[in-house]
Image (cartoon, rainbow, N blue to C red):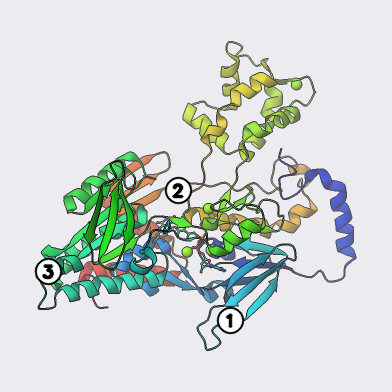
Amino acid sequence: FNGSKGHIAHADAVASNDDRRIASSEQVPKKKKVVLLGTGWGGMSFLKSLNNPNYEVQVVSPRNFFVFTPLLPSVTCGKVEARSIVEPIRNIIRKKNVNISYSEAECVKIDPNNKKIYCRATIDSHSKGEEVFAVDYDYLIIAVGAQVNTFNTPGVMENCHFLKEIDDAQKIRKNVIDSFEKASLPNLSDEERKKILHFVVVGGGPTGVEFAAELHDFVNEDVVKLYPNVQDLVKITLLEATDHILNMFDKRITNFAEQKFGRDGIDVKLGSMVTGINENEISTKVRGNGEKTSTAYGMALWSTGIGPRPLIKEFMKQIGQGNRRALATDEWLRVEGFGNIYALGDCATVNQRKVMEDISEIFRKADKDNSGTLTVKEFQEIIDDICERYPQVELYLKNKQVRNMVDLLKEAKGDAAKESMELNIEEFKSALSEVDSQMKNLPATAQVANQQGAYLAKCFNRMEECEKNPEGPPRFRGTGRHRFHPFRYRHLGQFAPLGGEQTAAQLPGDWVSIGHSEQWLWYSVYASKQVSWRTRALVVSDWIRRFIFGRDASG
Ligand code: FAD
Ligand code: MG
Ligand code: MG
Ligand code: MG
Ligand code: MG
């Protein structure tokens, strides 16, 4: 159950010897070409960790810089400057010992049969970038992220702001300040001023919540001084279709956030579905009773989740993944069915193996003496492999508060809690029958994309070594040292800044804490996560500037 699915088919030791003979008879081995699509979290992380000079890498992305997305909401109200959270991609690739080139273009089609992609230049120029060029690859890494999802709600594209890219954040910032200037013009009725200063946030996820909090802080800390006459006319509404905001967080955080927003005067409307939006009004329907209302608004932010980009939709159709929402890969991040195409981050999802799908094979492999029963000793020899291959096992043991798998089996066997215990296949199955219930899709976060990029780079760094010696040198054989481990996500926790210098932190082990010191933890984590010392210095100085002088309200 470990072999054929891994990067290397262990069983084919003979075949790989043949390959080696062929390889060594060639004079100068040509460098394998890796094409990477995207310069976001996944792509950047891959590039930063790749150090194998035996590859030639071509990066294709319409964006020649990386954006530190967790600080995008801070840009919307001027807490942090836009340029402080972007890093030019050429800064990242120039110091590498690896040969990396970059093309400012977007991939428009993937042709896996001919190992080619088609791209269109996206640089603003008179040519309008209409020419399409082809790029060949040996390995393709797809890290193009996702796009906003409007759920086909009428009017959203035309009338709403989004917060995905740096341009979006800058547009929002300009629009927020323009709103206050507009509302401060003479000859307006209070009614009109109120409409202009009604800010609506659609979607109670982390982005929507953080924007609402930023906006509220901006109003309280800066607007009171800069636009004292209109301060009382400001209204912030947060519309959420489900029963709670911050669904992905612990209940305690959700409750705290809802209460804090209530005290702050942010109008949180739960169970409220947006059915349409025009220039002046936003229409909603109450979930449950279906009651419809329309409200005048000045500015709206749409942040209800993400969907696949057209390129990915098209590619999924091509390869028979037509009705999925993200590209399915195996745990080695290879697109299902392709050995040389990888996908990671928001555009992809890892299809985890179920223990129950492989249970007979696991049993057969563990039962070395073919006795039809498993002894504790036989079982112990494969525990590490099982835990590595099926991460859900560890979660299950933790949730059931069982110390290890042997204990789990003993428990299943009942009174025979002796070392001499033996299990037949049916008993083995029933002991593990609920393990798969712990499988969860990985969230679409920077944390996941970042870890996947680093993991994939490690695979590429060690590719030849592992291909030559799939089991590792004899001394390490069986320890997995020279094999590729499947990708394993390590959740390091999650923050939800709630405004007023308060942040909710949910750390591993369901450790929840909320308050001012968490805000400082947030500052320090995000400062330390910056991709370069340049952006780190810029971000920290922006924070200090804001503490001393307040936000910059020009725009
Ligand atoms: P992206 O980072 O989106 O990168 C995609 C790249 O592909 C971009 O460079 C894009 O230009 C490029 N591209 C697009 N189309 C093509 C094409 N056709 N061909 C070639 N290249 C293409 N996550 C957290 O963990 N913590 C947070 O606090 C957090 N806060 C967030 C706040 C905001 C406002 C947003 C929008 C996201 C936040 N996230 C956070 C989520 C996180 O940003 C994403 O999960 C992460 O960016 C995914 O990385 P990625 O590499 O898959 O995609
Ligand atoms: Mg990327
Ligand atoms: Mg990004
Ligand atoms: Mg994903
Ligand atoms: Mg046996």
- Check disc 2 and report its element: helix, strand or loop: loop
In the rendering, at what x and y percent does residue 539 appear? 36, 68
Q: Quadrant of the C terminus?
A: bottom left
> Mark number for residue 230?
3
Does residue 259 appear in this view?
yes
Packing grade of label 3 (10 A; few <14, some 14-19, many >=20) is some
Write down the residue under mark 1: 130
In the rendering, at what x and y percent does residue 344 appear? 57, 56
Question: In terms of image quadrants, where is residue 11?
Answer: top right
Write down the residue under mark 2: 492
In the rendering, at what x and y percent does residue 115 appear? 73, 65
Residue at x 22% of width, y 45% of height: 259
Contact, CB < 8 Å: mark 3 with mark 2? no
Instruction: Give, as a three-letter code, the residue at label 3.
Output: Val
- Check disc 3 and report its element: helix, strand or loop: loop
**Disc 3 or disc 2, which is closer to the eye?**
3
Instruction: Give, as a three-letter code, the residue at label 2.
Output: Leu
Frontmost residue, 414 versus 477? 414
